[in-house]
Image (spheres, rainbow, N blue to C red):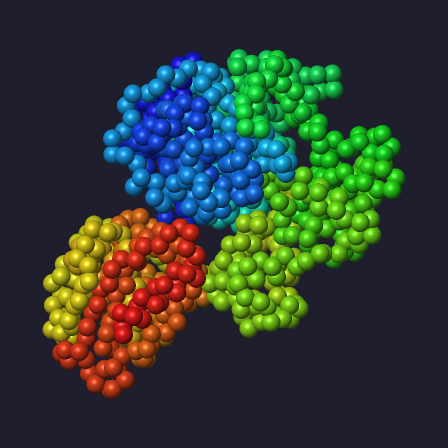
């Protein structure tokens, strides 16, 4: 066993040139090497010592997964400082309670989260984090040992006194050491596939997320790709593009991906039924379309954080993917048992890892002891030791002849009815979720005049009568003592969930217990969650709330608002909605019917026939070319700009250029905005920019115009239509243009802009969205969303004089009245809203024009 976890920083430095972390945030891809993360960790450790924060003190860490998060964590490890990680999806109220209980000397995290903490808290947000670090790193590590406290992990809860589990270096290394020893046997086989790439969808504030994001990857020199937006199309595209090897996720993510595959391949359920019992190579070949979709390098899922259904496990195994699942909990510092990746036991959570004593009690509860079990808790402002030798996990299991354990459910979830009978909610929920229109079900205890009974809370698409029929159908398949006699339709779009996808049963039970018996049987919705979601997006009151309400006029939802609504619905409901369908919807009732039609594909069991899953139409998409970024085309474009376009602009327009700041060339990449009056505005903007900027610019152009060129249509004459494809290729090559749709397809366009920025290209966009007569029009709200997603500085460019010449009917040939004003780069904080950003950009450009 390693002497302490700070030795992992030395491993980071050993892999210094290799990529450690790729953070996918917004439309950007942020890359950090192992060496960069290690250097930041040592600089943060040096800052802690400067602030006299030393061993035993606490640092609260609250933010999304990122390289900064990892460096902050290891910086604390180097100093022996106790880290208190909080879930980024957790509530501010819970964070304040943890803050009061642990009394940290410093809070570090995302700016948007830290603003919710009380004034007077000493905090540094990740926007200012690097600038605050000292230049000289810490080189001498203070004395550490295996029993040095490492972190305090608080699980989310509603009690007034949070209780945190204290981990030591010994606890973590007891889980890491056996994995590290086993990895050594297979490293020689890993070399041809190096680097392994992990897609990490878990919060680092949880032990499973830490195991897959902090401890395991460095042992392999692997890349970790952090992705927080759990939308199936985005995940699939990322896995294929980044050549991901292993996906680390909770079962809910695997369900989302399965749903998406059903929507793309309607024949998949029937093929799965026919493939049962076939050899592995035949199954792999039969489902080669799925492997092609996810990329040929993707071969395994590592699943944890919640129970994995045998049905879902069988689905992915049948497709030819290895599905590795383990079992652990916060108190055991992650893993107790693990399925060997090359000796997987189907339907089991694997065998106990070395160094763990695991046995089952008389009632089947898992009991554990060993060095990985935490022996201390943090509560009421102090660390308290525990003297219990065995940890009662509260989980029920059974074991097979080979010593593998099969998870049966939570002992603590068992409902003891007024008749003295025991009901395991999971058994009832499985039957309920097989009923038509039931997306998910939670069975919780409720108090009735006769005593405690089981009540089902449903996520249901349909009427109250249809829900009642679903309950009746389920009861026919349940034993008499399991049958549901009390039920309720959940009023929201989804159950409250933790960041690992677990349903927060406590909140569901609390909501259910607050209902009167009359309400329990009524099945009426307390509110309209769909209207509430639309109102949160538009931030304006609805003019009409019936199903006849029009999304545009009554609910004030513009095209970009629809994109945001589409994204929210996909993430909350797990349904895949194409751009064309969303744009074509006119009324609230049509939207409700669309969601209802797609409800069967949300969390389906494996259907008996392809007809059980409704195929979704594939939207026609524009082409977003990256071939103009190749070096031969780029070199040709530079020659054209400098030797042809720029001299011609100077000769024809004779513009005067005013550049406020001469340091903008070093601030790349930038988003460039300008007012839009003529078809030649892009050439004028390029003329005004400094050389280092204008040679690397990608220009957004109206998608319909580009598509007309590409498909040889829409021109005034037949000759022009014949020449249009040539114009398309020339414009794309010489000006590096890409399509920006007027309605559907914004997400693809935004993603392309992110790729361009990642490649070092500045992106030019005209926020008015159309040519004007010269008077600046209101900016489209999408520019604020784009700036926020791109996290890039914005350079405003004002084209002055074009409007006057256009309105006066005068030609601009060598008029001497054109002035090109290049402003200062504008920087925005992560806490700024898209509306605030849009207003600031419009105000700045308007003042420059005046």
Looking at the rendered structure, the number of numbered marks drawn on it comes to 0
| Location of residue 789 in the rendering, given as x and y in whole percent from the top left corner | 40, 53
Which one is nearer the viewer's eye here, 205 or 254? 205
Residue drawn 67% across and 45% down? Answer: 440
| Location of residue 276 in the rendering, given as x and y in whole percent from the top left corner | 61, 34
**804 up-or-down from 485: above or below:** below
Which one is nearer the viewer's eye here, 139 or 217? 139
Which one is nearer the viewer's eye here, 644 or 296? 644
Indicate the quadrant where residue 164 lies: top right
User: The C terminus lies in which quarter of the figure?
Assistant: bottom left
Left or right relative to 304: residue 481: right
**708 up-or-down from 75: above or below:** below
**543 up-or-down from 101: above or below:** below
Can residue 389 be seen?
Answer: yes
| Location of residue 227 in the rendering, given as x and y in whole percent from the top left corner | 45, 42
Left or right relative to 445: residue 625: left
Residue drawn 53% across and 14% down? Answer: 371
Left or right relative to 308: residue 136: left
Residue drawn 45% across and 18% down? Answer: 148
Indicate the quadrant where residue 385 lies: top right
| Location of residue 487 in the rendering, given as x and y in whole percent from the top left corner | 78, 47
Which one is nearer the viewer's eye here, 146 or 799? 146
User: The N terminus lies in which quarter of the figure?
Assistant: top left
Residue drawn 14% across and 78% down? Answer: 816
**Direction front: furthest residue:** 120
């Amino acid at each position: 066993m390693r002497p302490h976890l700070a030795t992992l920083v030395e491993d980071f430095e050993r892999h210094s040139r290799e990529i450690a972390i790729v953070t996918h945030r917004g439309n950007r891809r942020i890359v950090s090497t192992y060496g960069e993360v290690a250097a930041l960790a040592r600089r943060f450790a040096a800052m802690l010592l400067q602030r006299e924060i030393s061993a035993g003190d606490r640092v609260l860490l609250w933010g999304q997964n990122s390289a900064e998060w990892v460096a902050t964590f290891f910086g604390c490890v180097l100093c022996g400082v106790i880290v208190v990680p909080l879930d980024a999806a957790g509530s501010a109220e819970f964070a304040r309670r943890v803050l009061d209980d642990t009394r940290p000397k410093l809070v570090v995290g995302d700016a948007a989260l830290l603003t919710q903490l009380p004034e007077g808290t000493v905090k540094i947000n990740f926007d200012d984090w690097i600038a605050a670090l000292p230049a000289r790193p810490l080189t001498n590590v203070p004395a550490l040992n295996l029993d040095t406290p490492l972190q305090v992990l608080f699980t989310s809860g509603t009690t007034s006194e949070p209780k945190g589990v204290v981990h030591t270096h010994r606890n973590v290394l007891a889980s890491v050491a056996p994995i590290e020893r086993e990895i050594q046997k297979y490293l020689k086989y890993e070399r041809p596939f190096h680097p392994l790439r992990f897609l990490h969808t878990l919060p680092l504030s949880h032990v499973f997320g830490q195991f897959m994001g902090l401890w395991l990857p460095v042992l392999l020199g692997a890349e970790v790709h952090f992705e927080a937006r759990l939308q199936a199309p985005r995940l699939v595209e990322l896995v294929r593009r980044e050549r991901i090897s292993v996906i680390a996720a909770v079962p809910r993510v695997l369900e989302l991906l399965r749903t998406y595959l059903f929507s793309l391949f309607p024949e998949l359920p029937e093929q799965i039924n026919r493939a049962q019992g076939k050899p592995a190579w035949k199954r792999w070949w039969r489902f080669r379309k799925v492997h092609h979709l996810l990329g040929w390098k993707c071969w395994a899922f590592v699943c944890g954080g919640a129970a994995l259904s045998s049905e879902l496990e069988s689905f992915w195994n049948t497709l030819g993917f290895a599905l590795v699942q383990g079992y652990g909990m916060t108190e055991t510092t992650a893993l107790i048992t693990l399925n060997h990746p090359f000796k997987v036991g189907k339907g089991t959570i694997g065998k106990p890892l070395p160094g763990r004593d695991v046995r089952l009690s008389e009632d089947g509860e898992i009991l554990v002891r060993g060095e990985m079990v935490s022996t201390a808790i943090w509560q009421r402002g102090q660390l308290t030791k525990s003297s219990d030798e065995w940890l009662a996990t509260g989980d029920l299991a059974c074991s097979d002849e080979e010593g593998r354990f099969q998870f049966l459910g939570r002992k603590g979830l068992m409902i003891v009815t007024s008749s003295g009978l025991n009901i395991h909610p999971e058994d009832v929920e499985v039957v309920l979720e097989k009923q038509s229109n039931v997306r998910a079900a939670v069975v919780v205890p409720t108090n009735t005049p006769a005593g405690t009974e089981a009540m089902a809370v449903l996520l249901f698409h349909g009427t109250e009568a249809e829900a009642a029929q679903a309950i009746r159908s389920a009861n026919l398949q349940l034993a008499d003592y399991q049958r549901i006699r009390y039920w309720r339709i959940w009023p929201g779009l989804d159950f409250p969930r933790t960041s690992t996808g677990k349903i927060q049963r406590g909140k569901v039970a609390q909501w259910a217990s607050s209902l009167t018996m009359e309400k329990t049987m009524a099945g009426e919705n307390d509110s309209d969650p769909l209207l509430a979601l639309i109102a949160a997006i538009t931030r304006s009151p609805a003019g009409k709330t019936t199903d006849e309400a029009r999304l545009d006029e009554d609910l004030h939802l513009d095209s970009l608002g629809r994109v945001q609504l589409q994204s929210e619905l996909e993430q909350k409901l797990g349904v895949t909605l194409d751009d064309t369908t969303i744009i074509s919807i006119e009324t609230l009732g049509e939207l409700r019917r669309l969601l209802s039609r797609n409800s069967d594909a949300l969390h389906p069991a494996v259907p008996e026939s392809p007809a059980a899953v409704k195929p979704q139409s594939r939207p026609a998409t524009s082409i977003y070319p990256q071939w103009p970024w190749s070096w031969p085309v780029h070199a040709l474009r530079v020659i054209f700009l400098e030797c042809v376009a720029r001299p011609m602009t100077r000769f024809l327009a004779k513009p005067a250029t005013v550049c406020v700041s001469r340091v903008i060339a070093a601030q790349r990449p930038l988003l460039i905005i300008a007012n839009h009056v003529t078809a030649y505005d892009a050439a004028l903007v390029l003329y005004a920019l400094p050389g280092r900027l204008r040679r690397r610019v990608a220009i957004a152009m109206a998608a319909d115009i580009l598509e007309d060129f590409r498909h040889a249509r829409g021109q005034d004459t037949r000759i022009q239509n014949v020449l249009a494809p040539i114009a398309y290729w020339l414009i794309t090559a010489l000006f590096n243009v890409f399509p920006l749709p007027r309605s559907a397809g914004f997400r693809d366009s935004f993603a392309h802009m992110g790729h361009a920025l990642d490649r070092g290209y500045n992106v030019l966009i005209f926020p008015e969205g159309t040519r004007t007569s010269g008077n600046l029009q209101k900016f489209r709200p999408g520019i604020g969303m784009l700036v926020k997603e791109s996290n890039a500085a914005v350079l405003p460019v004002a084209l002055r004089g074009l409007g006057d010449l256009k309105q006066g009917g005068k030609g601009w040939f060598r008029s001497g009245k054109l002035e090109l004003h290049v402003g200062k780069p504008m920087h925005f904080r992560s806490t700024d809203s898209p509306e605030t950003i849009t207003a600031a950009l419009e105000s700045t450009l308007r003042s420059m024009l005046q």
